[in-house]
Image (cartoon, rainbow, N blue to C red):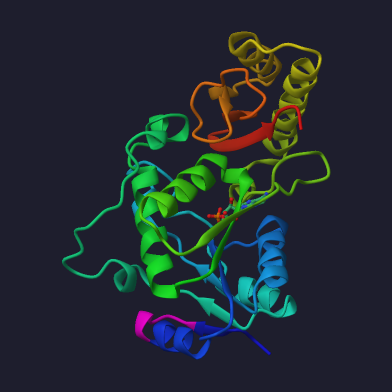
Amino acid sequence: MAPKTIISIRELKQLRKSFAGKSLALVPTMGALHQGHFSLVKKAQEIADHVIVSIFVNPSQFGPNEDFARYPRQLQKDLNALQSLGIETVFSPTGGEMYPQGFQTWVENTAMANQLCGASRPGHFRGVCTVLSILLNIVRPDFCIMGKKDYQQWRIVSRMTEDLHLECQIVGCEIVRESDGLAMSSRNAFLSSEHRQQAAMIYKGLKIVDEAFLKGQKDKEVLSRIFQDHIAAIDGAQVDYAELRNREDLGEWQGDDQVKPVFLAAVQIGGVRLIDNIELGT
Ligand code: AMP
């Protein structure tokens, strides 16, 4: 059966009441679904009695010069895919439903969000935290399933649920990749075939960093340089950041074994900004 597509918050809250006594997982997405999203859906189905997938291209997390208008939208195709996964409910509200006239309250992380992707996308995580707060309040899930593909987002939203005492466990899932290693992303569709081939170099660069780390290289400058030199072989590519951080609050890694490191990178190829990361030494 096709998933029930709910567009109104009132209706979703009513449905939520009928799940009383059962566990519920939310998989928040912006649609244009691929295997990365499906892995989150499968995780949700494993751990909860009911699953709601939300599809909402959230305007408030896009900057004025970003790709909100051309972000891929393919609701019917997404619904068909979710049907074959056995999803019963999809929440797909309009912008006006989520941000009605008079909306003026925002949720902001004031530390982790100012660096890495937040430095080049001011206001991005404010939009993410706000929309996630709204979704978590409407859906009231026991679990919210997120991908480590957006590592900083996952850590910020985890921190937000702690800080605001939200009754929801944030579950992080591993990155799903194409056969050449490129992390799956709805934005990969923007790449020309030449740039798509080049984009596979990002994960190769991360693997080289991981190898160097495993061989004992722990210097953040050296590891960043190794990655940047690798990407320099791609004509026209630009590294936005390539950073060694700790996995908890994404601050500087202190070299201790209690809190392990992650290496995160954002690279522009052919005008498309691609992000990826690798948990080092696992
Ligand atoms: P998006 O639709 O891009 O906002 O992503 C929705 C969720 O899917 C986020 O939690 C992402 O981190 C996750 N996600 C996107 N791509 C992947 C991937 N390749 N592997 C795992 N999770 C992913």
Please determine whether, in this image, residue 51 is positioned above or below residue 203: below
Q: Is residue 189 left or right of residue 163?
A: right
Is 79 in front, or is 259?
259
Residue at x-position 66% and y-position 67%:
44
The magenta segment is 6-10
Residue that lies at the very extreme toward the front in this rendered image: 258
Determine if residue 30 is in view: no
| Residue 35 location (% of width, % of height) | 72, 58
Residue at x-position 77% and y-position 26%:
207
Determine if residue 7 is in view: yes
8 part of magenta stretch: yes
| Residue 105 location (% of width, % of height) | 22, 57
Residue that lies at the very extreme toward the left in this rendered image: 102
- Please identify the quadrant where the N terminus is shown: bottom right
Q: What count of labels does the image hold?
A: 0
Q: Quadrant of residue 277?
A: top right
| Residue 209 location (% of width, % of height) | 73, 20
Please determine whether, in this image, residue 127 is positioned above or below residue 214: below
Please determine whether, in this image, residue 224 is positioned above or below residue 155: above
Is 175 in front, or is 143?
143
237 part of magenta stretch: no
Please determine whether, in this image, residue 203 is positioned above or below residue 158: above
| Residue 202 location (% of width, % of height) | 69, 29
Q: Is residue 105 left or right of residue 95?
A: left
Is 142 in front, or is 116?
142
